[in-house]
Amino acid sequence: MENEFKYTNKVVWFPFVFVFMIWLVYWLQIRFDFDFVENGILPRTASGLQGVLFSPFIHADLEHLYNNTIPLIVLLSCLQFFYAGQANKVIVLGILGSGLLTWLIGRSNYHIGASGLIYVLFSFIFFKGIQTRYYRLVALSLAIIVVYGGLVWYVFPMPDVTEGQSVSWEGHLSGLLTGCFLAVSFATPKFKKTPKYEWEKPDYDPSEDKFMQRFDANGNFVNLPPPEEPEVLEEQVTSLSYFTSNALVVYHVKQKNELEPEQ
């Protein structure tokens, strides 16, 4: 199992390429005065479906882009290293799933930004680590919740508006739910612990365990009852008496006289 975690160049270059793409889109937006906001998710409209694919690469301003850059690099790197076999599926299905759910439940505004994907990664890494019960992945889950646990507060409605823009809590909630669903759906049998002892096996019966029989229902140590004497059948007694005899046997010992010639 230790060999499952192998460092590859993809752990580094993939997060930076992904982040470079969203920075490139923002540069094109400010350099040529493009307005990509209308390519975001507009809930419950046919044209708004294009935002399911495009919205993670569109950001409103430099602060919005910067706030998403560092979490994307960290979480994508963790995903590529610890869950290399599921990484591509999590990213693709996470973008589609969170985008479609935002399209269904979101307010009638344009929803843009990679926040939904960040919540997918955060949710998947946390819940999958707890589900596997593998100590390294559980430690990763705890580290993620310590560093980014504050993200949970942004999945609730936030009516406060700053400079005409509000936080898309619907996108955050959609990403959190999608990541949790993917964590439960994707099987990771390689992280399943192989039973080493009898008591770890699913068919283990404590009543048949010699050691567990030394304890009563309250956990007190007790002595085992003495073994029962085997019952001797009448046929066995008869067969044993067949080989015995009550006849008296008399032995005469004669000492040899050395002067007496042998006959």
Image (cartoon, rainbow, N blue to C red):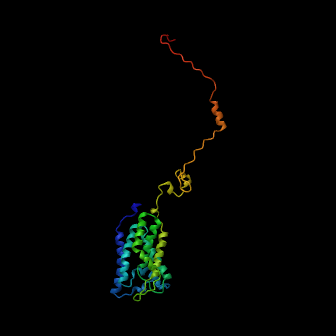
Residue 233 visible to the viewer = yes
Up/down of 84 relative to 107, above or below: above
Instruction: Pick the residue in front: 65 or 203.
Output: 203
Q: How many marks?
A: 0
Question: Residue 197: where, in percent of width, then height?
Answer: 48, 54
Q: Residue furthest left?
A: 31
Camera-side residue of 32 and 117: 117
Between 126 and 80, the one lying in front of the other is: 126
Q: Quadrant of residue 144?
A: bottom left
* Image location of residue 110, percent across then percent down: 44, 85
Q: At which x and y percent is residue 189?
A: 47, 63
The quadrant of the image that shows the N terminus is bottom left
Percent position (x, y) of residue 155?
46, 79
Q: Answer above or below: position of 32 versus 128.
A: below
Vertical position of residue 207 compared to residue 65: above or below: above
Q: Is residue 89 visible?
A: no
